[in-house]
Image (spheres, rainbow, N blue to C red):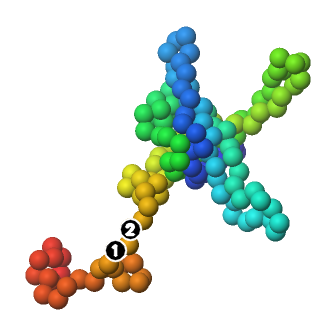
Amino acid sequence: MNKVILTGRFTRDPEVRYTNDGTSIARFSIAVNRRFVKEGSDQKADFLNCVAFGKSAEFIEKYFRKGMKADLSGRIQTGSYTNKDGVKVYTTDIVVEEIEFGESKGSSQAQTASPTPNPEADPDGFMSIPDGIDEELPFN
């Protein structure tokens, strides 16, 4: 079985092209954080080339941009070609079969904006509910 499940961030905007018969092809790369980092190593993420076809490619083109987090599944596909210098180049791509947003739109925008402290929040990140507001809450 050849199945890959990844969570990562787009390292660049997707590049979308169309074949002569109108099939869309999206190419992009994602950075996936490594679970364990070898001591003394600078590389904390793997940068994976991905390709999607058809409706998935159109969805990616419409909704994803550099820096956005995505959850995707697909398969690993290897290949090779001879470049203009006559050297054989080996490739490894993730063929995307399913993709979805890895975080809410507000979360991704919050990462680019500078965080502003909330004076009413407790140190644990939760807001204090004022006394006497119980009757206004929709659940009890």
At label 2, which amino acid type do we have?
Answer: Thr
Specify the quadrant that holds the N terminus: top right
Residue 136 x %, y %: 11, 77
Percent across and percent down for residue 96 are 58, 38
Vertical relation: 63 (above or below) 109? above
Task: Name above or below for residue 116 compared with residue 122.
Answer: above
Q: Residue at x 36, y 83 (%)?
A: 122
Residue 98 as seen in the image, left or right of residue 139:
right
Per the image, the residue denoted by label 2 is: 116
In the rendered image, the quadrant that contains the C terminus is: bottom left
Q: What count of labels does the image hold?
A: 2
Q: Judge the density around disc 1: few (<14), some (14-19), many (≥20) Cα neighbours within 10 Å.
A: few
In front of the other: 3 or 34: 34
The residue shown at (17%, 89%) is: 131
Asked whether residue 88 is in view, the answer is yes
Disc 1 to disc 2: CB gap under 8 Å: yes
Query: Residues under labels 1 and 2: Cα distance?
Result: 6 Å
- Name the foreground residue: 25 vs 121: 121
**Which picture quadrant has residue 95?**
top right
4 vs 138: above or below: above
Q: Residue at x 60, y 32 (%)?
A: 27
Residue placed under numbered mark 1 in the picture: 118
- Looking at numbered disc 1 in the image, what kind of residue is underneath it? Asn
- Answer with the quarter of the image where residue 132 lies: bottom left
The answer to whether residue 70 is visible is no
Q: SS for tag 1?
A: loop
Residue 56 is situated, as x and y percent measured from the top left of the image, at 49, 33
